Image (tube, coloured by chain):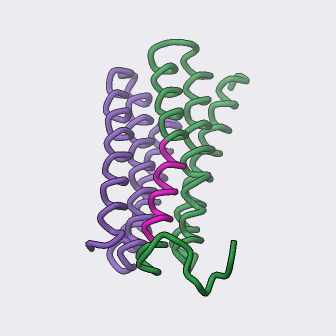
Amino acid sequence: MDLSAVAVWVLVALGVAVELACCVGVVVMRDVYDKLHYTGPATILGPLAFAAAIVVQEGVGQAAVKALLIAGLLLVANPVLTHATGRALYIRQRDHLEPAPEDGPR
Amino acid sequence: MTVWLAACTALLVGLIPLGVVILRGSVLEGLVALELASVINTLILMLLAEAFHRPGFMDLALALALLALAGGLVFARLVERWI
């Protein structure tokens, strides 16, 4: 087994481990805000590890470019989705987006 | 079984607990689990395309990533007040 094959194995194993750990985190955490934190590594570290593994395996080509494009898209989409979900939870809990009087002056 | 197919199988197993959260948790917990499941499904499609040496099929993963973003935003907007 040459060095690139080992690198592919390591990167794929890293990606799978990150994704499964995030799945466990979403199940185990009790608060929705805590659960929301676990979508971060799953959309950043996992896709980048898989894309890097594909680049190592295939070299620069169609598959590598598309894999990097997918990883980049997930990288950009996750903060937007996380913000929208957190905002939805905040509004759902307080029925408004502005600070309440009991929050005190800013 | 190649490393890619083994990774796909492991990721499919990860979808099971997320399905449990979607079925048994609150609406927002389900939304968070759905967002993570969309990411994992995207990665599964990407790995399957690599496993079968069909880079053209990665367009499916790309389309799913785009549609999951749009779908997640729509769900989040609805969950704010209307669901």
Relative to A1, residue A76 above or below: below
Q: Where in the figure is residue B12, as x and y percent of width and height?
A: 41, 54
Q: Main secondary structure of the magenta part?
A: helix
Kindly identify the residue that appears in the image at 52 percent across and 63 percent down: A23
**Quarter of the figure with residue A47:** top right
Q: Is residue A41 above or below residue A95?
A: above
Question: Magenta stretch?
Answer: A77-89
Q: Which chain can be seen in green?
A: A
Q: Is residue A14 magenta?
A: no
Task: Say which residue appears at 42% left-offset and 56% top-offset.
Answer: B35
The residue lying toward the viewer, choosing from B5 and B66, is B66
* Residue A20 picture quarter: bottom right
Residue located 60% across and 36% down the image = A48
The extreme right residue here reads A3
User: Would you place residue A15 above or below residue A53 in this image?
Assistant: below
Give me the chain that's purple: B
Residue A88, x across and y down, in percent: 42, 67
Q: Residue at x 54, y 49 (%)?
A: A79
In the rendered image, the residue lying farthest to the left is B82
Task: State the residue lying farthest toward the bottom.
Answer: A102
- Residue A40 lies, in percent from the top left, at 59, 53
Observer-nearest of A83 and A36: A83
- Can you tell which quarter of the image residue A28 is in? bottom right
In which quadrant will I find the C terminus of chain B? Answer: bottom left
Q: Is residue A29 left or right of residue B40?
A: right
Indicate whether A57 appears above or below B25: above
